[in-house]
Amino acid sequence: MSSTGGETSKMNSFVKKVKMGKRVEKMMKDKSGTTTGQEIADDDPNKTPEPYTCTGIFEADFTEFCRRNHLKDNEIPAVVIRPKPPGIQPPPDAKSKDSKDSKDASKDPTPDESPDTGSQEDPPPKTYVTKEKYAYFRPVIQVEMENDEKPITVTEIYIRGWKIDLLMVGIFKQCWPTIEKLSVVNLWNVNLSEAVIKEFASFLPQCPNLKTLAIDGTICVEESWALLIGEESLLTSLSLRNNGITDKGAAMIGKALSTVKTCNKNLISLNLSGNKISDIGATSIAQGLRMNRALLSLSLANNNVSNEGAKRLAEVLSRFPLTHEEVVERRKLLSEKGSPDRGLVKSPPPSRRGDNRPGSVRSSSHMDKTDKKRDKSSKKKQDGKKGEKEKEDTRSIRSSAEGCKSEKDHGKSNKIPMDGKKDKDDATKGGSKKDDKWKKGFMKASIAADTMTKTKGKKTSSKDKRLPESDSPEMVEAINPLLEQVENMDNQLWIPGNRCMINLNLSRNNITEIGMKSLLLAVQYQITLLNLTPSPALKGILRMSLNGNAVKKTDETFMKLQEVLLTRDPYYKPPEKGEDNQSLAG
């Protein structure tokens, strides 16, 4: 009986343990069910996340937006500092070596017979960095900062060898405009589509200091690169090297540079080397340079440009006839601003006369002007002892500037009649909206060209940072190319060509002696025009690269062109007189 009683007690304890185990499992299942429910609720894609405000720190903002777009941590490109080559240590000075050796000899007159040379030598510089097996192929965003310890000072962004899609460019759209010091974006082999380029063009003007953009080694089937240099673009330098751009893309770029009514007023440098642009594309770009007065440097190196393209570019640089559309636009601008010859006509135009006054009757404004002329000499004597008159601001339109000055000199106390006031306002303000485009671009081009030619080849010290007034770049009045002085030849209106461009690269093309002659004539024409009417901003071509074309270096035209360009190169230093005398004496 005792054995049976012990067995029953063991069975009861076993049953209790089984029941307890089942209860524990049930509780664990309930807990796990609640936790998974919470995780599902947290990972619910329909749940709207809290709004995120950018901090200006690119790495933090970029990572946060990637996570909000449901990218995993291993899918988010890492933001790293761009590696730099190791610094080269300067060679030791020979004098310091001799002094050290003499000191050592004085201290230890009996040097060791077997010196330890290994301890004296510096360790070799480290020119490589070891990484994981596939780390090199993972997407990475390289950045450069003003101060590596402050991540908010990102100035340059480099992306190499991975595709930028709409999702990624949408993240950039939210991050980049908040980086205050971002000035350079360099993309290489990023496989952009037309939609991505449109998205770039939409938010790049929002980046306050972004001026340089390079997209190299990237082929876009639609070739919609012209969207990046629209009227709203703030870029000053654009590089599109090795992008397979054909005549189709060159035509769109030419229209983006300028048309009869629009122009790009900020772009200073454009690099289109290593593409597939032929004479048709070069003609389209030359067409865009007709009304553009902001671009200073153009590179068409390593393309398929031959004599016809060189002729079109030379024509734009020298002088060219206006088309019918340009003549019509010129007449519109003249009518808006007022013709310079209108001031010679005694009676005002019919639109400014009274309703019931014939054309032969003089207006009250004209009578007032004649009276002012009579009293001019007497007023000058009375006002001669007074203080100096206030300096008058020069007007952009020369034709109206003289009229404004005469009205101010006749007396400031007299009231100007309504008709005269309208004439003055029309002369000074007419067409201001359209001319602002040309003024801004021309002012930037004039200052940049003047500073480039003055500072190249000179080492500026801290004392010379502040230039005297005579050496400071002059603010030249901007004139719409259509309003420049015209010349009537063969029933056509001819205007001077583009003299704002100072650098043209046509190396490694198919230009022969015929194209070289056209370019030579264009440069000679610019030099002649500069000697007749010197201008600080309109200097013309200063450098032209023509090596690697289908012409021999011993060709007479090529050699003459090189001689002419040599003296215009900002880096050219004429030989000193002493050297010439020594060579003659030798």
Image (spheres, grey):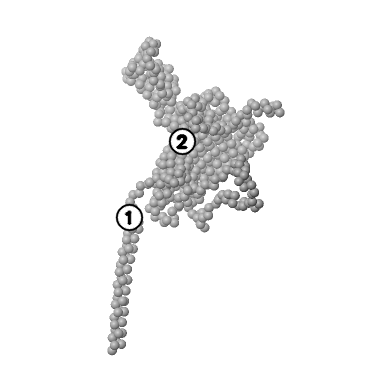
**Residue at (40% x, 31% y) in the render:** 433
Quadrant containing the C terminus in the rendered view: top right
Which residue is tagged 2?
266
Horizontal and vertical percent for residue 250? 51, 40
**Residue at (35% x, 14% y) in the render:** 368
Viewer can see residue 493: no
Amino acid type at mark 2: Asn
Q: What is the spatial separation of the Cα atoms under label 1 and label 2, in whole angstroms?
A: 44 Å
Quadrant containing the N terminus in the rendered view: bottom left
Q: Looking at this view, is 222 or 554 the one in front? A: 554
Give the secondary structure at mark 2: loop
Q: Looking at this view, is 21 or 213 the one in front? A: 21
Q: In the rendered image, which quarter is residue 377 located in?
A: top left
Give the number of callouts: 2
Image position of 231 (left or right of 282)? left
Residue 340 in the image: above or below residue 546? above
Q: Residues within 10 Å of mark 2 (few under 14, many from 20)?
A: many
Q: Residues within 10 Å of mark 1 (few under 14, many from 20)?
A: few
Q: Looking at this view, is 70 or 470 the one in front? A: 470
**Residue at (33% x, 20% y) in the render:** 418
**Residue at (65% x, 36% y) in the render:** 553
Pick out the residue farthest to the right.
Answer: 586
Horizontal and vertical percent for residue 52? 35, 49
Amino acid type at mark 1: Lys
Q: Could you tell me if the residues under marks 1 and 2 are in contact, i.e. CB atoms within 8 Å?
A: no
Horizontal and vertical percent for residue 76? 43, 53
Q: Earlier in the sequence, mark 1 or mark 2?
A: 1
Viewer can see residue 422: yes
Which residue is tagged 1?
47
